[in-house]
């Protein structure tokens, strides 16, 4: 048990259930129904080390680099931490094609060229700028206007952030998921922007400065590729441990309840054991191991489709069910 | 201005704000703030299985000699005859007579002086790596990067099209180099490569950490990939198959330069040439990292394979120059 002042983030002291459903259009369940805080309390098991790392990242205002195997809960950690902190959440999944400019801003050159060829159609340069998630996270009003001053009748872009409580939250969390998938230049190109929480739009020369008080930046990597040393040295880092059986059972108990009788206890235990065996098998074969979310799916499925005598009968059906939701060919 | 890497200031800030109450928490906090360095990740089981280490053949050039700084016009003498002025001609032109081998007779145990730890006798150090450690990442990333169309508009090309009055169907973009295509790594495990096995392993490890397992196809072969190749034990090797067209194929091999003396797996220039033609026809031009002077390779083969000299003088800029010079047949 780590002992320190959880000045910035303490999941055990979350505020009461939020009753307001203010963002019904969002389908992200952690934010939907205004229940993000309650969902966080109920669903997510924060490791002690992860809570400490989030506190350190907030204290030092450094990006938090979360590493760990696939399925260890890196993305969920960012999402639930943002919800628990009451921050607007932005997420960008990085791919091999992602460039640093995609996260900051891009320029619709073709549209501008098209307008340039039509008489009196050319708009200000800013009108062709498309803000990236980093821009939205640090400066949402500016992003909505593409860097232009707000004017009457001027259509604003829709904020892609997930708002936990109310519009205009003063703090945000930005997740750059799987940062190691990008080319090595990308993290280095982002260094200055991440450090300063500001950047310059190349095409217009506009300097984008932060409107929000603070932006907590999460970066995730599964350690498959190395990140540039200069980038690593500027991040607070945490490696999430591999899920173990006890942790999985705790996750199931948080999500589906405890004290429901021996059926559920046996089910959680049996499925957690199954996941651990499949993970070992996947490791040996160099394949993707089942994740925690797949374990949760398996518990949900079995809870709905099986009755209390499931252990004794229909072993073949159970196996088929587990193959469908859990093993997905890992054993073969 | 870019913030400096994690430093004492960050520690003071985090410790001051979070106030850890015990040694364990302090240690955990310090660990989170410890600057990370990239680490390579290579499971060596497959490598061990593939190589089945063979002792260096009498024809193999010694480790020390391979590490000598290349000097234009200087030939490398035979390993077992370091005092001779023998010049090794390009392979396939002259038959070199194997040196006489004498059986090793161990001296009696009583005649062997016993060394104790206080005697001050030092173990011989490993020779320095063929490529400087600080440069390996940049060199390998340059080696496997391939050009593709980027985001930035190529204004010069755009102007040329507009001035010529051609209809503008798409915007020409500036070329950028990326690792997104991944690579195929072919590792020669014939006896000729034994003296530099540590360098080979270091390159393998570094490429895995740069590209990740999902983007690197890692195969072993002996002599030439045309004689089967595979990721594991030799018994499982199959006929070599090219990766997707345009994927760089990097071969760590001597291209037969070490000679044929007592090397059952020696392959001549003709066979390498046929293989290079086949690979190029399939859209996978071969790039060989060669631990010998380039002039040792017959010109007919050097025209078919892009050869990058694997020595201390290698740099990322030199790799880029070599790739640009051979662009016609490398970047398919």
Image (cartoon, rainbow, N blue to C red):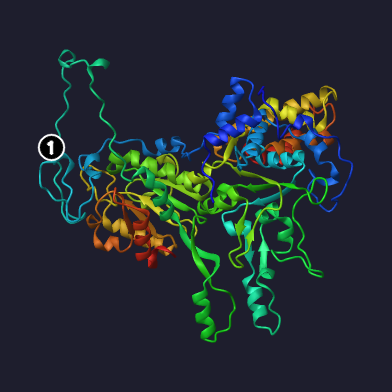
Q: Residue A161, image x and y in percent?
A: 75, 52
Mark 1 neighbour class, 10 Å CA radius: few under 14, some 14 to 19, many 20 or more: few
Front in this rendered view, residue A191 or B194? A191
Q: Does residue A241 show up? A: no
The residue at the far left in this view is B84
Q: Residue B259, image x and y in percent?
A: 22, 48
Residue B37 horizontal side relative to residue A94, left or right: left
The residue at the far bottom in this view is B165
Residue in view at x 33 percent, y 39 percent: B197
Instruction: For mark 1, name the chain.
Output: B
Front in this rendered view, residue A250 or A318? A250
In which quarter of the view is residue A83 placed? top right
Front in this rendered view, residue A232 or B325? A232
Q: Residue B18, image x and y in percent?
A: 65, 29
The residue wearing badge 1 is B100
The residue at the far right in this view is A19
Front in this rendered view, residue B137 or A193? A193
Secondary-structure class at tag 1: loop
Q: Quadrant of the C terminus of chain B?
A: bottom left
Question: Is residue A7 placed above or below B76 in the rendered structure?
Answer: above
Residue A91 horizontal side relative to residue A97, left or right: right
Q: Does residue A90 show up? A: yes
Residue A124 horizontal side relative to residue B143, left or right: right
Question: Is residue B75 placed above or below B104 in the rendered structure?
Answer: below
Residue B288 horizontal side relative to residue A291, left or right: left
Label count reads 1
Q: Residue B97, image x and y in percent?
A: 13, 45
Question: Is residue A141 placed above or below A319 in the rendered structure?
Answer: below
């Amino acid at each position: 048990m780590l002992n320190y002042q959880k000045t910035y983030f303490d999941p055990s002291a979350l505020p009461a259930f939020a009753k307001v459903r203010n963002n019904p259009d969002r389908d992200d369940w952690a934010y939907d129904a205004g229940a993000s805080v309650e969902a966080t309390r109920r669903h997510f098991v924060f490791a002690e080390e992860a809570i400490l790392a989030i506190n350190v990242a907030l204290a030092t205002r450094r990006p938090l680099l979360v590493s760990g195997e696939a399925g260890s809960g890196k993305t969920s950690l960012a999402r639930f931490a943002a919800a628990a902190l009451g921050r607007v959440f932005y997420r960008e999944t990085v791919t091999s094609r992602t460039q640093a400019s995609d996260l900051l801003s891009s320029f619709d050159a073709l549209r501008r060229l098209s307008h340039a060829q039509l008489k009196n159609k050319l708009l200000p340069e800013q009108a062709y700028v498309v803000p990236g998630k980093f821009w939205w996270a640090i400066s949402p009003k500016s992003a909505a206007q593409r860097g232009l001053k707000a004017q009457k009748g001027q259509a604003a872009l829709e904020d892609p952030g997930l708002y936990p409580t109310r519009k205009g939250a003063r703090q945000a969390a930005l997740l750059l998921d799987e940062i190691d998938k990008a080319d090595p230049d990308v993290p280095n190109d982002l260094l200055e922007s991440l450090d300063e929480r500001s950047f310059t739009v190349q095409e217009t020369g506009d300097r984008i400065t932060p409107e929000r008080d603070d932006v907590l930046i999460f970066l995730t990597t599964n350690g498959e590729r190395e990140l540039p040393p200069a980038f690593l040295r500027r991040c607070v880092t945490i490696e999430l441990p591999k899920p173990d059986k006890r942790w999985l059972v705790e996750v199931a108990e948080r999500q589906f309840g405890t004290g429901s009788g021996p059926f559920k206890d046996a089910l959680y235990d049996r499925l957690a054991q199954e996941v651990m065996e499949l993970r070992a098998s996947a490791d040996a074969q160099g394949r993707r191991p089942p994740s925690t979310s797949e374990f949760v799916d398996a518990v949900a499925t079995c809870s709905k489709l099986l009755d209390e005598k499931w252990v004794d009968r229909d072993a073949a059906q159970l196996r088929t069910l587990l193959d469908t939701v859990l093993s997905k060919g890992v054993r073969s | 201005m870019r913030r400096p890497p994690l430093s004492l200031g960050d520690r003071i800030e985090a410790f001051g704000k979070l106030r850890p109450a015990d040694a364990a928490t302090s240690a955990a906090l310090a660990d989170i703030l410890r600057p990370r360095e990239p680490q390579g990740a290579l499971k060596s089981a497959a490598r061990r299985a593939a190589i089945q280490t063979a002792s260096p053949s009498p024809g193999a050039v010694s480790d020390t000699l391979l590490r000598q700084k290349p000097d234009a016009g200087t030939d490398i003498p035979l390993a077992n005859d370091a005092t001779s002025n023998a010049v090794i001609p390009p392979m396939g032109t002259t038959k070199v007579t194997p040196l006489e081998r004498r059986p090793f007779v161990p001296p009696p145990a009583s005649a062997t002086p016993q060394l104790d730890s206080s005697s001050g006798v030092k173990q011989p150090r490993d020779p320095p790596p063929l490529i400087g450690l600080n440069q390996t990442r940049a060199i390998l990333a340059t080696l496997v990067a391939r050009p593709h169309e980027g985001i930035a508009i190529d204004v010069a090309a755009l102007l040329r099209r507009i001035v010529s009055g051609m209809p503008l169907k798409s915007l020409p973009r500036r070329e950028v180099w990326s690792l997104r295509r991944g690579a195929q790594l072919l590792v020669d495990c014939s006896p000729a490569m034994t003296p530099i096995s540590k360098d080979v392993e270091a390159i393998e490890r570094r490429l895995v950490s740069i590209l990740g397992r999902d983007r690197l196809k890692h195969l072993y072969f002996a002599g030439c990939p045309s004689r089967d190749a595979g990721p594991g034990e030799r018994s499982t090797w199959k006929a070599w198959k090219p990766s997707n067209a345009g994927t760089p194929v990097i071969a760590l091999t001597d291209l037969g330069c070490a000679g044929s003396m007592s090397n059952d797996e020696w392959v001549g220039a003709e066979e390498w040439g046929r293989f290079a033609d086949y690979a190029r026809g399939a859209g996978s031009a071969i790039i060989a990292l060669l631990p010998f002077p380039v002039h040792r390779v017959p010109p007919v083969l050097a025209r078919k394979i892009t050869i990058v000299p694997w020595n201390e003088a290698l740099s990322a800029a030199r790799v880029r120059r070599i790739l640009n010079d051979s662009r016609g047949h490398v970047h398919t």
